[in-house]
Amino acid sequence: MTPPTAITSRDNPLLKRLRLLAQDSTAYRKQGQVWLEGDHLCRALLARGHRPDVAVFTDRYWPQAPQALREAAPQVVTVPEALMAGLSGLESAAGVGFVWALPAAVPLASDAPTVVLDRLQDAGNVGSILRSAAAFGFTQVAALKGTAALWSPKVVRAGMGAHFGLRLVEGLSVADLDGLAVPLLATSSHQGEWLHQGELPWPCAWLLGHEGQGVSAPLEAMAQRHVRIAQPGGEESLNVAAAAAICLHASATRRSA
């Protein structure tokens, strides 16, 4: 194994590039790379059979880092903890981060179990929904224009590794969804059958809308079915990530049955 290269200047070109990747939500589109910070994300990438281009360790963590992380990338660098903190989006900077080549853009798969994101703004919600999609067997996430960038640092952190097992398609229009050959399902607070009572098709596509405005009228008009989630406690609505988890879990359990 080649010894790591020590970087001590914050003006190093690699660190300048990493700061942009770590702090600009759309920099990945320009650079074609993604910054993955922390042991969990780095291990999740390797577990899916992927390899990073660059591995960055703090000089304190490097001597104790697991061999799988130390040998993961063809280029390995170490930096002082203070420089890693300058890159970090975490309250406490991690000891390791990977730079990974952004996956090539893919077309919408017509028959895949899909989650459609319609202008969701909150990165935490988007990342949480990606985790639910991966957990419950939905293999594709289709993000309409106006949705938080799927590979932004905050969404990647919230996704906790789910990104690496999903087909992610960004920048779509409502018209692009004509390419889906599976039934489109939308939740509603005032119409449709109760989620816990009705049959659910598989595969299908769940439509999840903006946190405040919900699914847009043109997209809702495309839905073949509307479904209501029982809320006996009387709340007016659910957080979109919570609603997504309930709906996707229902699809998964009905599929198993």
Image (cartoon, rainbow, N blue to C red):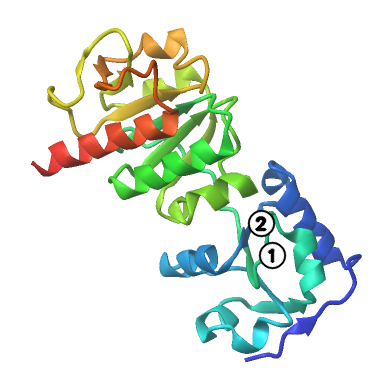
Circle 1 residues within 10 Å: few <14, some 14–19, many ≥20: some
Q: Which residue is mark 2?
A: 90
Disc 1 residue type (three-letter):
Ala
Q: Nearer the viewer, residue 247 or 218?
A: 247
Residue at 67% across / 44% down in the picture?
A: 29
Q: Position of residue 174 (x, y in %)?
A: 47, 18
> In the drawing, does residue 106 fall left or right of residue 182?
right
Question: As rendered, which of 214 and 72 lies closer to the eye?
Answer: 214
Check whether the beta carbons of the residues at disc 2 and disc 1 lie within 8 A of each other: yes
Q: Quadrant of residue 59?
A: bottom right
Relative image position of residue 44 (x, y in whole percent): 46, 64
Label 2 Cα crowd, 10 Å radius (few <14 / some 14-19 / many 20+): few
Instruction: Name the residue rendered at 78%, 56% in the picture.
Output: 19
Task: Give the residue displayed 25% in from the left and 21% down from the top.
Answer: 232
Residue 111 visible to an observer of this rendering? no
Q: Which residue occupies the extreme left position in the image?
A: 257
Count of numbered tags: 2
Q: Give the structural element (helix, strand or loop) at label 2.
A: loop
Residue tagged 1: 93
Residue 212 can be seen, yes or no: yes
State whether residue 22 is above or below residue 56: above
Q: Residue 249 location in percent, x, y?
A: 25, 39
Task: Tell me which amino acid carries mark 2.
Answer: Leu
> In what quadrant of the picture does the N terminus appear?
bottom right
Q: Residue 72 at x, y = what percent?
A: 56, 77
State the quadrant of the C terminus: top left
Q: Is 50 placed above or below 69 here?
A: above
User: Where, by quadrant of the figure, is residue 148 drawn?
Assistant: top right
Residue that appears at 41% across and 25% down: 208
